[in-house]
Amino acid sequence: MSRLIIRNGRVIDPSQNLDRVCDIAIEDGTIREIAESIANPGGSSEYDASGSVVCPGLIDIHVHLREPGFEHAETIESGSRSAAAGGFTGICCMPNTQPVNDNATVTNYIRAQARRHAAVNVYPIGAITKESAGEQLSAIASMKQAGAVAISDDGKPVMNARMVRRAMELAGSLNMPLIEHCEDLHLSAGGDMHEGVQSTRLGLRGIPRSSEDVMVARDLILAEVTGCRYHVAHISSENAVAMVRYAKSRGLRVTAEATPHHFVITDADMPPYDSNYKMKPPLRDRRDVDAVISGLIDGTIDAIATDHAPHPGAEKMQEFERCPFGIIGLETALPLALEKLYHSGRASLPDLVSMLTCKPASVLSLPGGTLQIGARADVTVFGLDHKWTYDLSRSPSKSRNSPFDKRHFRGGQLATIVGGEIVWQFDKL
Amino acid sequence: MTKGGLLDIESLERDEIDEILARSKDFQPPRGEPIKKYDYLRGKTIVNLFFEASTRTRTSFEIAAKRLGADVLSITAAGSSVSKGESLVDTLNTLGAMRPDAIVMRHSASGAPHFLSRYLPIPFVNAGDGTHEHPTQALLDARTILDRRGTLEGLRVAIIGDIAHSRVARSNVFLLSKYGVSIVLCGPASLMPREMKELAPGIELTSDMVQAIEGADVIMMLRVQLERQHETSFPANEYFQFFGLRPEHMEKAKPDVIVMHPGPINRGREISSEVADSQRSAILNQVENGVAVRMAVLERVLLQ
């Protein structure tokens, strides 16, 4: 019988409105007791969390693990270790692998690999259409049986509205959320960065806000028609946030996520033609960043998700227009959220924790996101004030595409506990 | 900012531009006299690396280098290792290992020289990068205006055509705005991002040719860049009717208006032959000044 006592931390668990300094006892991988002072009869290991926050393990519902097919960029093992190093105990992996996760065989493969190699819990997301080509529906029901938690053609938005409607009808009947990467590919065609003053100045083709907005509008209409649970991935534009807010006020089963980069930096922050600032949706401008932050604060946006998208150096070391889209983000998500939402005074700590724990868990009906007695002991410990610098060269990820290398942070993850085992600890070096 | 090369006009200080323009005057051959050659760059090697077709710019840089006594080597992308799948960085690293003193590069990707100069210690002179900038074009345009008007300040310059895809327009906007020129950009709305207005002070936008030309001291016509349009942004058969410069327009402009064009010109598409060949046309002066300005740029980049 393994036992771990986490001592004296500020335990914040928004799922049960808990915020007080106490001890947590973990036994055989589950939360056994939360109390002011838990005795150690001997035989229990202890973790001193004095001065730190202890919360349910963080959950990232938008990650690319690249396995199978692109193991040179990331694997389930390396990506999950990067997640652990970011304080995440659960991650959902997008289906744009090779082969695409569009049938139960691939779903089973990912789950088997995760059981063998993953440092954290891995929940696969299945494709909406075969090969995410937008033409035929994938094997949605059997993927659900195999453990897929949602469907999405992330990266390749479904342009055919009729196809989306049918997928929503099916997913709705399975109580499976449909996640859309909202981008009208005709409006964004050829674009490399947000369409605005910066793209005009740099002579780069633009990805207009409207390419996101028209897709969100279309999908919200279809979500209403079908009653399907609908989730907007990486929301980035002011109008899109407003439309989701409106849909929620109408009682639609609509949720949304935002990435840290979309609420921390703008298109103007990009050093000229630095491809570590190239992603979809693109970094937008101040107005959109403010709208995303407001959306997080008022609950329009449910969750913070990273869209961790590894690309090896060679792919990002090209002319800007040839570089692939995407940045890694698991290890910088919590400190960026602390910086922008908590230290800035915009969000309370319990609210911030909820955006990374119980709310994402609820968006996709995942286990976790709670420290209730009997729950699996997935726990994250983080500090609020220690100063540290992100060193990308030490990341467990196989890729190095981050704009946040060498960024100075105040506070961040200190330990990651999965099923009662400490899988990662902050290295003070 | 010319230290280590010339990547764009935007990051140049006005006094740096002044110095280049002043020095280029020294390199203009006096009328009727034979072309002078210098040995300021003797022993220096310049590689002209053109990943995009170009006759005038490449030749102009080559002649400029030779008139300064440099050894110059011109490479066009066709037949280079790029067509064998080598990455741009690897190609440039290979060239860099042969220790040229500067690389003059044209590339179809915006920011290609900026990207490369982060990895290579060699100075780059940007000879046109995608739809971003064409710094020496703006410098030679300024030289040409100065030759006829003596000053840039207080002038009204109309830039007309496919603004969206034009690196010439961007470089000129950045240069002219540093001198307080009032700039009118004119073109089909679908080829003229509204954000152009925010690039610098003193810019107005219009889709009305006559409005653009009224009171203009300089009219810069841009080439219709069919190769950069990824879709039909304006019906080709209507272009000349609405955005082609024709003799009747000339009456609206100032009597001594200067007509410019970066070339190559498409007669009957963006400019009529009558205007292109008229007294007011400075098109050939631009070409001539191209050599002088590039001599000044190369000298500056290589000798500092």
Image (tube, coloured by chain):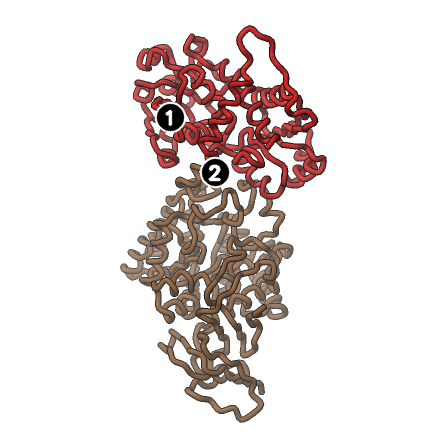
Chain colours: A brown, B red
Q: Which residue is rendered at x = 40% and y = 31% of the image?
A: B178
Q: Is residue B78 visible?
A: no
Gap between marks 1 and 2, in whole Å? 19 Å
- On the same chain, marks 1 and 2? The answer is no
Q: Which residue is rendered at x = 61% and y = 52% of the image?
A: A312
- Tell me: residue A169, above or below residue B38: below
A189 with respect to B49 (left or right): left
Tell me the residue that label 2 is attached to.
A204
Residue at the farthest bottom position: A41
Q: Quadrant of residue A233?
A: bottom left
Tell me the residue that label 1 is attached to.
B187
Q: Is residue B254 visible?
A: yes
Question: Amino acid under label 1?
Answer: Gly
Tag 1, which chain? B
Element carrying mark 1? loop
Tag 2, which chain? A
Q: Position of residue B33 (x, y in %)?
A: 57, 8
- Tell me: residue B161, above or below residue A89: above
